[in-house]
Image (cartoon, grey):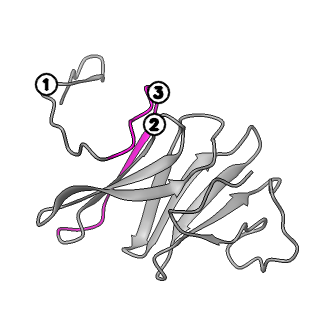
Amino acid sequence: MYCNMTTGKFYSSDNIIISTSIPSVHNETGFAALLLGSTLGYRVYYHDKNQSVNQLDYTNSNGWSWGGFVSQDSPSSSAIHAAFSDKNNISVVIPRDSENFEVSRFNTDNTWHICTWYPHPVFPHTELPEALCPGDRGVRDNTDPPLL
């Protein structure tokens, strides 16, 4: 890819197939990428054709691989934001609807914890502890079905 410095737009200069065994990319996906360090490599987040958020992993030693689902919930737009403070503390944020964000947090137990964020939790569960944020929907791994 290269950037046109006048328009600020990126253009593809080459195509590289990074994996043939990943869910297909949605035509209007957003992307978020993190560099976790020289050893841990990159994480790239995108929406597949069903709008689920997926993770791609890249390390120098293993190349590209599919890291699994982050969230199989349908977002209200294609925006994705990702941030990290440690290899086992990654957060991926998507718009849940016009008033709420969904925050998926990867934790030291190697699972994604999903919750909705202010101003209005979408799925408040009084029986679950609010360990992560208001409206915490519990621990899920990347094989769980979407929450409805």
Is residue 35 shown in magenta? Answer: yes
Q: Position of residue 144 (x, y in %)?
A: 58, 62
Quarter of the image where one finds residue 62: bottom left
Could you say whether the residue bearing mark 1 is in a helix, strand or loop?
loop
* Contact? badges 2 and 1 (CB < 8 Å): no
Which residue matches tag 3? 28
58 or 85: which is nearer to us? 58
Which residue matches tag 1? 13
Against 111, residue 95 (above or below) is: above
Residue at 68%, 63% (x, y): give it.
Answer: 115
Q: Position of residue 112 (x, y in %)?
A: 54, 68
CA gap between label 3 and label 2 equals 7 Å
Secondary structure mostly seen in the magenta stretch: loop
Q: Position of residue 116 (x, y in %)?
A: 71, 58
Q: Is residue 98 left or right of residue 107?
A: right
| Residue type (three-letter) at the residue carrying disc 1 | Ser
Which residue matches tag 2? 30
Q: Quadrant of the N terminus?
A: top left
CA gap between label 2 and label 1 equals 20 Å
Mark sitting earlier along the chain (1/3): 1
Q: Which residues are magenta?
A: 22-38
Against 133, residue 97 (above or below) is: above
Quarter of the image where one finds residue 2: top left
> Mark 3: few, some, or many residues within 10 Å (few <14, many ≥20)?
some
Could you say whether the residue bearing mark 3 is in a helix, strand or loop?
loop
| Residue type (three-letter) at the residue carrying disc 2 | Gly
